[in-house]
Amino acid sequence: MRVVDIIQNKRDGRELNEKEISFLLDNYQENKVPDYQMSAFLMSVYFNGMTKNELKIFTEKMVNSGDVIKFQGIDKFLIDKHSTGGVGDKTTIALAGLFAALDIGTAKLSGRGLGHTGGTIDKFEAIPGFSFPQTKEELIKMVNTTGTGIMGASENVVPLDKKIYALRDVTATVQSIHLIASSIMSKKLAVYADGLILDVKVGSGAFMKNLDEARKLSNAMLDIGDSFNRKVVTILTNMDEPLGFAVGNANEIIEAIETLKGRGPKDFTDLIETIVGMALKLKGDVDSLEEGIKKVHKVIKNGEALKYLKEFISYSGGNGELVDDYSLLPTAKFELRLFSKTSGWVKEINAEEIGKAGMILGAGRATKIDIIDYAVGINLNKKVGDKVEVGELLAIIHYNNDKNLKTSEKMIENSYSYSQTKTIPKNVILEINSVNI
């Protein structure tokens, strides 16, 4: 068997069999296939895609290229919620309390932020003293004690994906729907969960810029989930504006806590209610999303969700009292208030620009070696559909130095566009799809 023939078959649109895919990937992992041949193969996939069976074989090879983690000794139904990345996405913080209050476990590997989207690890590390488990055994103990276990991604999980992604990054093949789907699902399948919920962001602040592309990604991930007989839900959500009002790290912790107190932004509240409602359906506790959402309302109203989040923070070395005393979180030295120079209705907010405006203040990383400033960030005061008059407050910038302040200020101002007629904001939940539930 020759690699060139495999490339030619994929280039010409023929379906590859298991022997061909295995031969290519095994030899690439062992450095017996040069990057230029794998690049040609990836470009062929970019243009021709993969069939459901090719996706299954390709993803299975990714999964088995490194450690496959199963959490023996956890006595909870495990849900792994994954987001494709957005601006102001503090979902996992709120879910830590909600899942635990409803007897759902979470044991997952999460990453740090890079670029305009924030990382779950960074947000939790904004809590002074907070630390993550370092071993699988510590993670299991954390889940059994608090209901939630999160730790940094392991280098030994799907190492083949890391190698291929690095090549995709320099060969203009990152945008391939099937390669994205396989990359995401291989990491999810390599770490066992009873059910997967995939939050696919759609819009200016997301990787998927339009609904058509997001549906293709959703369908590809559902196909993979079905091939592995796993319970999978995809929720397509709006990212044409930041999620909630807070963008940053410490200030997103605050907004997540406020949401568990019943005082959260409508879009963020709708999102977490939907995710948890679908998790309860996956678990079999409810027959419908609506029934699940009622259970969510109950544990927010009676304070159970907040209590479990407090316990999780305390268990992890942080001061759980911060749920009522936000001064225990990092606080920026300065703030700048931005006022509108235009009147009208907010028509759009470019979420990517808002994310970048926060990043250059220090809330995110432009490169992997950048150091996060947990205190800085942006709090929006106006969202899509809001009426704005000249001189009204648009946003507050929290900063510790003025190095990129003017640039950040201009980016935020320019991210807003207006209409002289009322704009109806999109619902945060655009579409829900599932397999095997």
Image (cartoon, helix red, strand yellow):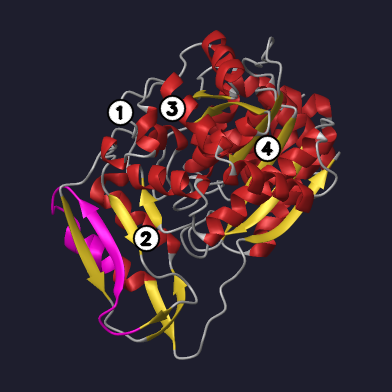
Name the residue rendered at 77%, 53% in the picture: 290
Secondary structure under the numbered disc 2 in the rendered image = helix
Distance Cα–Cα, label 1 vs label 4? 36 Å
As shown in the figure, which amino acid type bears the numbered disc 4? Ser
Residue lying farthest to the bottom in this orientation: 420
Q: Which of 411 and 337 is in front in this view?
A: 337
Q: Earlier in the sequence, mark 4 or mark 2?
A: 4
Give the left or right position of residue 360, taking residue 432 as reference. left
Which type of secondary structure does the marked residue at label 3 adopt?
helix
Q: Is tag 2's residue or tag 3's residue first in the polypeptide sequence? A: 3
Q: Which mark is residue 431?
A: none
Q: Which of marks 2 and 3 is in front?
A: 3
Query: What amino acid does circle 3 point to?
Result: Ile
In the image, the segment drawn in magenta is 389-411
210 or 275, which is in the foreground?
275
Task: Kindly report the distance in space between the C-alpha atoms of the residues bearing marks 3 and 4.
Answer: 33 Å
Residue 69 found in image quarter: top right
| Label 4: few (<14), some (14–19) or many (≥20) C-alpha neighbours in 10 Å | many
Which quadrant of the figure has residue 7?
top right
Q: In which quarter of the image is the N terminus?
A: top right
What's the CA distance linking mark 2 and mark 3?
28 Å
Residue where numbered disc 3 is placed: 313
Q: Locate residue 233, reporting x and y percent.
A: 74, 44
User: Which secondary structure, mark 4?
Assistant: helix
Residue 182: give its label.
Answer: 4
Q: Which amino acid does label 1 sit on?
A: Pro
Is there a contact, CB below 8 Å, between mark 3 and mark 4?
no
The reply to whether callout 1 and callout 4 are in contact (CB within 8 Å) is no
In percent of width and height, residue 182 lies at 68, 37
Q: Which of marks 1 and 2 is in front?
A: 1
Q: Name the residue under label 1.
A: 128
* Secondary element at image label 1: loop
